[in-house]
Structures are given as structure tokens and as C-alpha cells.
């Protein structure tokens, strides 16, 4: 979907765009993340049960197991 938005603070938009680029996110995805966060913000108390798993990137598939090995020698 394409859209146009009026009355956006140019300085803030440039900072947002630069930050998204530094994180390797396309602008649309970064904006979607922020809008989703805005929509869920303040809707009741946060619970750990509401957190969704995320991807940490290639090579992190066994990160939990690796941490356990380091901490507990398992």
C-alpha cells in the first residue's frame, strides 16, 4: 500500500528514516512497528504473556542452548 501524509515534521521524519536505515529496516516496516506500538500502548497492563517471539537473525537459532552451555555447563 502506498500513502501520502501531510504535515509531518521534516526534521523528525529525517531522523526516523535514518534510524530505520541504520537498523536495516525498510521505512514502511519501521513505520508499521511504530504504529503498532502506538496502538497497543496504554491498553491495560503489560504481561509477559503478550510478548511474541522475534527473530534475532541468522546464526542465532541455538542461542538459548549456547547460553545455557556457558552459564550452566550443560
Image (spheres, grey):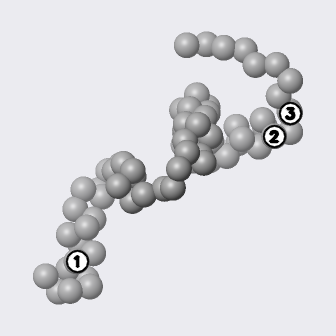
**What is the secondary structure assignment of the residue under circle 2?**
helix
Q: CA distance from mark 2 to mark 3?
A: 5 Å
In the picture provided, is 39 more to the left or to the right than 67? right
How packed mark 3 is, by other alpha carbons closer than 10 Å (few <14, some 14-19, many 20 or more), is: few
| Residue at 56% across, 32% down | 32
How packed mark 2 is, by other alpha carbons closer than 10 Å (few <14, some 14-19, many 20 or more), is: few
**What is the secondary structure assignment of the residue under circle 1?**
helix
Q: How many marks?
A: 3
Res 68 label: 1
> Residue 6 is drawn in which quadrant?
top right
Q: Position of residue 9 (x, y in %)?
A: 86, 33
In the picture provided, is 3 more to the left or to the right than 61? right
Q: Nearer the viewer, residue 19 or 51?
A: 51
How packed mark 1 is, by other alpha carbons closer than 10 Å (few <14, some 14-19, many 20 or more), is: few
Q: Position of residue 11 (x, y in %)?
A: 86, 39
| Residue at 20% across, 86% down | 72
Tell me if residue 65 comes above or below residue 15 in the rendering: below
**What is the secondary structure assignment of the residue under circle 3?**
loop
| Residue at 39% across, 50% down | 50
Residue 56 seen in render: no
Tell me if residue 10 comes above or below residue 69 in the rendering: above
| Residue at 27% across, 65% down | 63
- Label 2 sits on residue: 12
Q: Nearer the viewer, residue 10 or 50?
A: 50
Q: CA distance from mark 3 to mark 1?
A: 46 Å
- Label 3 sits on residue: 9
Amino acid at each position: 500500500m502506498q500513502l501520502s501524509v501531510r504535515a509531518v515534521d521534516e526534521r523528525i521524519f529525517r531522523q526516523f528514516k535514518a534510524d530505520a536505515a541504520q537498523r536495516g529496516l525498510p521505512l514502511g516496516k519501521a513505520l508499521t512497528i511504530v504504529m503498532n506500538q502506538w496502538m497497543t500502548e496504554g491498553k491495560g497492563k503489560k504481561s509477559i504473556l503478550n510478548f511474541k517471539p522475534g527473530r534475532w537473525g541468522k546464526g542465532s537459532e541455538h542461542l538459548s542452548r549456547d547460553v545455557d552451555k556457558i552459564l550452566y555447563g550443560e
